Each structure stands twice: as C-alpha cells, then as structure tokens.
Image (tube, rainbow, N blue to C red):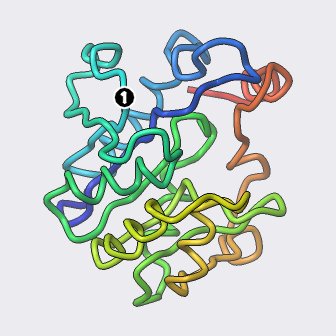
Amino acid sequence: MYNDITGIILCGGKSKRMGTDKSFMKLGDRYIIEIMADLMKLIFQRVILISNDVEKYKFLNLMTYEDIFKGKGPLGGIHSGLINSDTEKIFVIACDIPLITKNAISFILNYPSEKSIKVPFADGFVQQLCGLYSKSNIELIEELLNSPGHGKCKVLELVEKADGEIIYIENQMQNYKKDTFLNLNDINSYNKAAELYSD
C-alpha cells in the first residue's frame, strides 16, 4: 500500500450520453463508485474524491473536494486533487472505468520513469484519466485552465507540454487484459462491462 501517493477518484462527468449518473449504476450488487473506491483503498493509504456534489458521496466516508476552477472538465479535477493532497504525487482515476485492475494500476505506478506524469496508452488512446501526476505541474495546469479553449483536450495538452511518459501498456504488461480501460460512455459499453465484470 502506498502512503507517498494519494489516490484521486474523479466524479465530475455529466453522464450525458448515458442519461443517468454512471457512478451510481451497478455492476453485480455494488455501485460503480463503490467498486472504484474499494479498489483504490486497497492500493493507497489516502483516497480522495473530487466532485462538485459533495453530499452525494458522503456514504463512502472519503474526503471529498470540489473543483477550484469550476466548469473546466477533468483537468480542473486533477488540479483540485493536486492542491488538496498531502503527497507530492497523486494517482488519478476516472470513476467510469470499472474494469481497471490493481495489477494495471501497479504497473503504471512502478513503470521506470522519473517524469512528472505517467499515463498509459491503450485501445488507441492515451488514457489520461488513469495516471500519475505530480505537484510540480500545478503552475502549468493553472496556465492551461486560464487559457482560452480551442477544442483540444486540456489534459492531453498537459501531458504533451509536461513531456509526460506514455506507457504502451498493452504490449509491455504481462497478462494484460483486453477492455481493462473500457470507459462507460453509453448503455452499450455498460452492458459490455456488466458481461465482463467479476467480483
């Protein structure tokens, strides 16, 4: 268990395509947010939620903080996680990738790199909401949050500007499982996750 890295769960998505709050959909007999919280508590001594609806998650008994920069998407959540953590590094995870495993997270954490950001590449995308971020990036993040939007994902922009480590996890991790990073964007992806999920 890590005591020098804080686990951060981002719960800020609007769930527009799903039509209901993804974090309170169930896999098996548990809410997805419970699955994510239990997994993170296995790995990190400190786990924090980032949400602008603090009351909704009180039942989890985790410290919950709002975005400091409101309406700025997941980069605002990463910023709040860095500001509110007591550790130099945080491991960020979105609340809607419930098939992620302890082994996959451990692989990212232990990947040999001194860079201030480490994120995996899988399923054809940089999985920027499942990675390690350091407080040394706060100033750059605030610059990006204060800059006008131009259609580019701000978290990806951060990874590029900070020269983050991209981990090609599908090829580099032994026993990598397909769909580890399945994102619950719509009912089809939820149904797929429900088929694949096992307690």
What's the residue at 44%, 87% (across, down)?
A: 115
Q: Which residue lies furthest to the left in this view?
A: 86
Q: Is residue 113 above or below residue 184?
A: below
Q: Does dot 1 land on a helix, a strand or a loop?
A: loop
Give whichever of 65, 89 is nearer the camera. 65
Residue 25 image offset from top left, x and y in percent: 59, 14
Q: Residue furthest front?
A: 148
| Image coords of residue 34 (percent x, y) | 42, 23
Q: Name the residue under label 1.
A: 52
In-image side of 197 versus 90 (left or right): right
Q: In which quarter of the image is residue 155?
A: bottom right
Q: In this view, does 14 lie above or below 21?
A: below
Q: In this view, does 154 lie above or below 186?
A: below
Residue 169 x %, y %: 68, 70
Residue displayed at 32% across by 61% down: 90
Q: In which quarter of the image is residue 68?
A: top left
Q: What residue type is labelled 1?
A: Asn
Above or below residue 71? Residue 160 is below
Question: Where is residue 174 drawn, in percent x and y?
Answer: 67, 70
Asked where in the image residue 166 lies, by quadrant, the reply is bottom right
Is 142 in front, or is 63? 142
